[in-house]
Amino acid sequence: MQLFLRRISFFLEALLNGSYILLFTLNQNKKIPHRILSEEQIQSYLDIGAYIVPIVILVVLIINYLKSENLQDFLRKYVFSLIVFVPLLLTLGDQEFSYWLVTVHLFSSFLSLYEIDQNKTKDVQTVMEATFLYKLKMRPAQFVILSFIGLILFGTVLLILPVASPPGKSLSLIDALFMSTSAVCVTGLASVSVADQLSLFGQLVLLALIQMGGLGIMTLYSSMTIFLGKNMAMRHRVVMQDVLDIGSMADLITMIVNILKYTFFIELWGVVVLTIGFSFEGYEFGQALYFGFFHAISAFCNAGFGLLNNSLESYASSPLISGTISVLIILGGLGFIVLKEIKQTVVERKPYHTMTVHSRLAINTTFILITIGAFYIFFSEYMHGLDSFDLLDKIQVAFFQSVTTRTAGFNSVGLNSFYSHTLYFMCILMFIGGSPGSTAGGIKTTTFAILIQSVRSTLRGRPHVEFFKRKVPSQLVVTSTSIVIISLMMISFFLLVIMKVETQQTFLTLFFESISAFGTVGLSLGLTPYLTVAGKLVIITLMYIGRVGPLTLALAIGQKSSIQGALEYPETKIMIG
């Protein structure tokens, strides 16, 4: 009965209040042809809607009260609805105020669909069968994919609002979708200028999408559930366990709290140092604080969005700014599990070899890739792209550009001044990306390391892949190979498509843009603002695939339930090579 009431209340709110939100949004952006509805009719509908939406919220409150155990339980779970309902009554009939409140409440109701009362369930199977998503036969991979889609669409609605743009300017639907996708997927590619085309509200919306995309919508929701004192549903724990790759459910809540704790303190450190850095560059304290706040979150989440039209080119010689950004990018790209082990190793003064194989592999691979990238950029561009810098600045810029190709997207020098072979090498680094469980994209450092070690083992005639005197399971080797192959196939396909729709652009420009989008990097050769609508849709798709992961996408589409007692066929030999 409770599940039925929950669905009815959400359906009612989505239908009526959702229609009001849609009509108000379209009207504000002048997207309703007058041949369909006249201005008088639109205003009449909006006036009526402004009085209906509080009634809908009231009905939802009544339904929620009926399915609550008592008044205390009702207040604990639905106090937010009361907070929204009271201002709606006080400003009854105000179209814009009603619009903002019901939009936020509808999003809250959408999140509450994932809650399940555990006290009334006896085991995991009962909880699983009681969920709406289970009825839809939705697997964890599909849940992750739809969660990101929902967040992207919600961000698009917010960015298309008039208040999200400066006076006299507005974002088109495709640009709002592009920017929302780029923020949620923590990419950093921008079809419009963040500084010029977005108001303060629009920039804060973008920053919120970056933070939610970096942490993951599910991690964020789980943390909200914990801090509000609610029980996390068993189904949601199962999904989170799959996403965070945690073996024990007992460690799940601890891991989520650690993720938030590390994120807060690392970003806070970045805000303080960057505020000092921007203050030294001549900014007033208020603006320096805002710049530090925005760039710290963007850097740690590996997003690459900035408030300057030339990224960080003006501060290429500032070690305080570029150095801090580099540290934030590296920490964000290592992964929360690795950060936790680093902290334990440093605090407890443990030897490096006591860390898990995963953490050591992620750290070693990251260090090697950054070092190789810095050396390559330094020597190949010493007398070319870096010619205008002195020796120390060349080292600093080469290091920064090597770090930022790890899916961050900032640049301290114009990339169009680089040689083609340097840009191609940067594409390789962008394709590899950061480490699993981090805010970074790409195929991941551990996947790349397993693939390289697999080749070495084959050339040496060894039957197994080994790291630090530990054998890697064959299934992991097969999975790593599958990720690389699927990634290459997807990039090749979408590169072919974008070459078809962007016929005026060079191959290198399109190739660089495609790799950057798939690796959720954000670096560009200046193509992004000039993409056609079809080209933007291709890049949007690539950014999305790169964020959720090619293997996750493939599993969500084609995964089948395991069949008990399935036959195991005999082996055969096939000639290869």
Image (tube, helix red, strand yellow):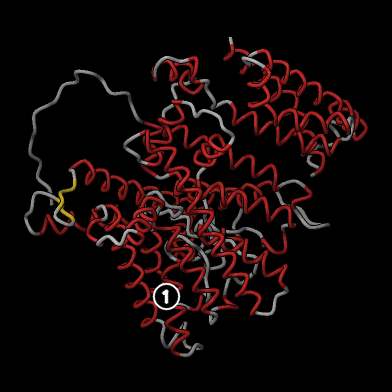
**Label 1's element?**
helix
Horizontally, residue 478 falls left or right of residue 542, namely: left
* Three-letter code, disc 1: Phe
* The furthest residue to the right: 40
Residue furthest out toward the top: 1
Q: Residue 146 in the image: x percent, y percent?
A: 51, 34
Q: How many marks?
A: 1
Q: Is residue 495 visible?
A: no
Residue drawn at 45 percent across, 58 percent down: 332
**Residue at 56% from the left image edge and 60% from the top image edge:** 268
Crowding around mark 1 (Cα neighbors within 10 Å: few <14, some 14 to 19, many 20+) is: many
The quarter of the picture where residue 482 lies is: top left
Nearer the observer, 33 or 185: 185
Residue 400 visible at all? yes
Residue for point 64% across, 44% down:
155
Q: Camera-side residue: 519 or 342?
A: 342
**Depth check, front residue: 236 or 110:** 236
Farthest residue, direction bottom: 390
Q: Is residue 120 above or below residue 423?
A: above
Image point (12%, 48%), residue name: 576
In the picture of the structure, the residue carrying the numbered disc 1 is 399
35 in relation to 347, above or below: above
In this view, 2 is above or below 284: above
Residue 178, percent across and down?
60, 50
Q: Splitting the image into 4 quarters, where does residue 362 fall?
A: bottom left
**Image vertical order of residue 363 relative to residue 486, above or below:** below
Image quarter of the N terminus: top right
Q: Tell me residue 167's x, y (percent).
A: 83, 57
The furthest residue to the front: 348
